[in-house]
Image (tube, rainbow, N blue to C red):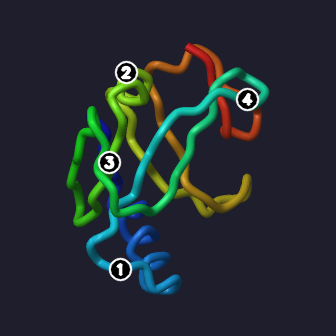
């Protein structure tokens, strides 16, 4: 499963409010091919459930992850960083054997 930190949850709620995303939408988290390490994370709001999707609710955030992505994301914590290295969502993924310098892509 995937966990959502309180800080990340707060930022997801802020974005939904700012962008006027309907409350019945969820945050879709997925892994796609690409990036300098081979695999990249993807975040998007949508309101569809597809076959094989898993729904996870934590800290008031509803996440949906497809079955294939869940294999790469099991045990991952979605966090938010606003430190000196930049501001944005961060995936603390225990399955990643290598990540790129910007943290946007990984390999297993």
Give the number of the mark in front: 2 or 4: 2
Label 3 or label 2, whichever comes before in sequence order: 3
Label 1 or label 2, whichever comes before in sequence order: 1
Callout 4: SS: loop
Question: Which of the 4 image quarters holds residue 22?
Answer: bottom left
Question: Which of the 4 image quarters holds residue 71?
Answer: top left
Q: Which residue is mark 3?
A: 64
| Residue occupying image coordinates x 23% and y 66% | 60
Q: Which residue is mark 1?
A: 22
Residue sitting nearer the eye, 5 or 83: 5
For the residues labelled 1 and 4, the Cα–Cα distance comes to 34 Å
| Residue occupying image coordinates x 52% and y 33% | 31
Callout 2: SS: helix
For the residues labelled 3 and 2, the Cα–Cα distance comes to 13 Å
The reply to whether callout 2 and callout 4 are in contact (CB within 8 Å) is no
| Residue occupying image coordinates x 67% and y 38% | 103
Q: Which residue is mark 2?
A: 71
Please state, as top left, top right, bottom left or bottom right, where the N terminus lies in the image.
top left
């Amino acid at each position: 499963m995937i966990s959502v930190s309180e800080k990340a949850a707060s930022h997801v709620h802020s974005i939904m409010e700012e962008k006027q995303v309907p409350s019945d939408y969820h945050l879709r988290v997925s892994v796609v091919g690409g990036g300098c390490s081979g695999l990249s994370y993807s975040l998007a709001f949508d309101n569809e459930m597809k076959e094989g999707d898993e729904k996870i609710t934590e800290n008031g955030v509803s996440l949906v992850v497809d079955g294939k992505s869940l294999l790469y994301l099991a045990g991952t914590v979605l966090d938010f960083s606003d430190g000196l290295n930049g501001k944005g969502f961060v995936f603390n993924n225990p399955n990643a054997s290598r990540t790129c310098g910007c943290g946007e892509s990984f390999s297993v």
